[in-house]
Amino acid sequence: MIRTQPDQSFEYGHDDRERQVVHVLQPVGRATPRPGVILLHGGGPTGGTPLQDLDWAEPLAARGYVALMVGYRLFDLETRRSPWPTQLEDVQRAVRWVRAHAEALGVDPSRIGAMGHSSGGHLAGLLGTTDVLHDHDPGLRGRSSRVDCVVSIAADADLMVPYRDAETTRVVSAWLGGTVGEAPDAWRTASPTHNVDSHTVPFLVLPGSRDESVPIAMSRNLAVAQSAAGVDHIAAELAAGHHDIGISEVARARWLEFLADRLHPEH
């Protein structure tokens, strides 16, 4: 039976206006601990909801993973609330919270992957290329925010590549605190491609060759940087548009195979 609601929901953080929540879908009848997969929703810095990833969570849970759909604070274009790097801070905290509560969640803290589509793939990429920005939470101090592998689907992987439309450029500029000319360091630091080094975790990079929203050059540049750094990665361009690739059966087969090879759900 396909589940339409998470099994559990937990608060992993909060500010004075909202709670940050992780929704959990557990594998049925499986021994613990199991590998966990952090699912990060798309929608740009201003939109989306974690439960839109239930279609990914279900096949993961069916194959023995604990699927963790993470909500994070969204940028408010009108008030400028929650600008970069709020979203990265939130998802890094979520990974550390999962590791701190691994036993209760039935998760093996040494087998945690992250995956996302579009802006979710952007954040997943940063979880595989950066370390924690802030380590002052007493309950999480010393715990790593870096995941063990990443699936990056049609992701905004290199923000130094220009977007095709002016509205996306306007929103991203507001989120990052200026245009690429005004705030080049922010655009570069926020790009997984420009954080790749020898410590970068294994990646599966899946762009769509017919992507009408995110330039395919972003994913190509990420793969080039990974090759230059000697990073374990697989890059495969699929014949799909930006939204099609998120529901593509071909893409699903690729990421399920990749996660099985890196996280070993059968163990």
Image: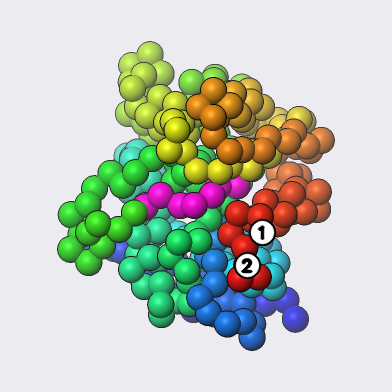
The residue at 57%/77% (across/down) is 26
Rendering quarter of residue 7 = bottom right
Q: Secondary structure at mark 2?
A: loop
The residue wearing badge 1 is 260
Q: Amino acid at mark 2?
A: Pro
The C terminus lies in quadrant: bottom right
Percent x, y of residue 172: 45, 31
Magenta region, residue range? 145-152
Q: Is residue 194 visible?
A: yes
Question: Which residue is drawn at the image coordinates 77% and 31% (left, top)?
Answer: 210
Q: Residue at x 64, y 86 (%)?
A: 29
In which image quadrant can residue 129 be found? top left
Q: Is residue 150 magenta?
A: yes
Q: Earlier in the sequence, mark 1 or mark 2?
A: 1
The answer to which quarter of the image holds residue 5 is: bottom right
Give how far across and how far down residue 32 sits, in percent.
53, 79
Q: Could you tell me which quadrant the N terminus lies in?
A: bottom right
Residue at x 48% of width, y 71% of height? 107
- Please give the residue where the numbered disc 2 appears in the rendered image: 265
Q: Is residue 16 above or below residue 205?
A: below
- The residue nearer to you, when weighing 159 against 192, is 192
Vertical side of 179 occupied by 122: above or below: below
Residue 165 in view of the camera? no
The kind of residue on which mark 1 rests is Ala
In the rendered view, does 133 fall on the left or right side of 127? left
- How far apart marks 1 and 2 lie (CA) works out to 6 Å
CB atoms of marks 1 and 2 within 8 Å? yes
Q: Decide: is 261 above or below 244.
A: below
Give the structural element (helix, strand or loop) at label 1: helix
